[in-house]
Image: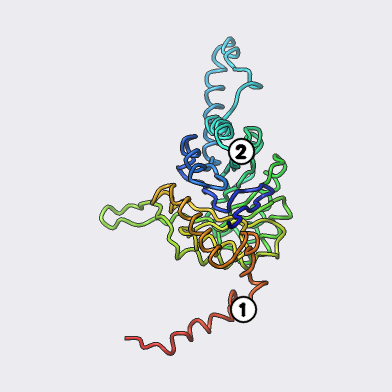
Amino acid sequence: MADLTTSYLGLTLKNPVVASASPLSKKVEGIQRLEEAGAGAVVMYSLFEEQITHESLALDHFLNRGTESYAESLTYFPDLEHYNIGPESYLELIRKAKQAVSIPVIGSLNGVSTGGWVDYAKKIEEAGADALELNVYYIPTDPAITGQELEQNYVNLVKDVRAQVRIPLAVKLSPYFTALPNLASRLVGAGANGLVLFNRFMQPDLDIETLEVTPNLQLSTSSELRLPLRWVAILYGRVACDLALTTGVHSGQDVLKAMMAGANVAMLASELLHNGVGRITEILSDMAAWMESYEYESVKQMQGSMSQRAVAEPAAFERANYMKALQSFDNKKLY
């Protein structure tokens, strides 16, 4: 029987199928269902910088409100050494999840700036998380911000989070960078143990009847796999970190492609939200059947076998293959 085990962020996983951050991990019962379906690990739903900042500001407001009115009001302050600021329920969920399941539980912080909120990285570690995923979701809308400044902000953020924790740290990126390999190397130098490719930014729509912006999130499709697949294949062996492929993972073949490109794990959420967590079991079964049919003994045997460094035509991942792809239509009749 094929060996599906893999390693990610220094953790040994029974298989490379990882449930990425989604509403499915908002309850212990949901995390248990993911484990029962066969997930190799679970990434918790994200704790947002805005949530932490809001909680902190709200607490500061109520602690200081009216304290100058009466001297005795100063005695209303709680003992701050024993007062936890912020969404304690998130940390409690990690604690309970670690007691309920045996697979790795990876915390997730979603933010864009350095500041006091990164202290929660340490709290997530103390709650028992096996690793931490830093989900950087930022749309640079200010024309004054340069690409260099933006990238440096990412690097600084990783440094600040790394200073807080000892557990493995992964960084979830978008594909919208001018020189992604360079940024990847700098993030690894700043303390990242892994990179997750790629984040899907929300694309709002316009309602022309109500003249309103309608924010919504559409689930991914397998056709979106190609972008992260390409960059995993390019970065494999070039950056000294683990690689996770996410966006567009919907089938056993998608996971196999991710492994061959060089990923350590393939993360999925849309497929599970659309068709249920039982899809993990089916995906793993399809993977095992394919590997047995093509005489692959293990996932590790195929990892990186189709990366840019391993294939006979590495230019297929670059611009040189662009003309070849266009020329493939020359012999077709188009009507």
Which quadrant: the N terminus? bottom right
Tell me if residue 315 comes above or below residue 104 in the rendering. Answer: below
Q: Viewer-proximal residue, 28 or 188?
A: 28
Residue pointed to by mark 1: 315
Q: Is residue 56 visible?
A: no
The CA distance from mark 1 to mark 2 is 43 Å
- Residue at 55% x, 45% y is 43
**Label 2: which residue?**
117
Where 317 falls versus 176 (above or below)? below
Q: For the C terminus, give its image quadrant.
A: bottom left
Mark nearer the N terminus (1 vs 2): 2
Name the element at disc 1: helix
Q: Position of residue 173 (x, y in %)?
A: 58, 56
Secondary structure of the residue carrying tag 2 is: helix
Q: Residues within 10 Å of mark 1 (few under 14, many from 20)?
A: few
Nearer-the-camera pick, 327 or 174: 327
Residue 147 figure quarter = bottom right
User: Residue 145: x, y in percent?
Assistant: 59, 58
The amino acid beneath tag 1 is Ala
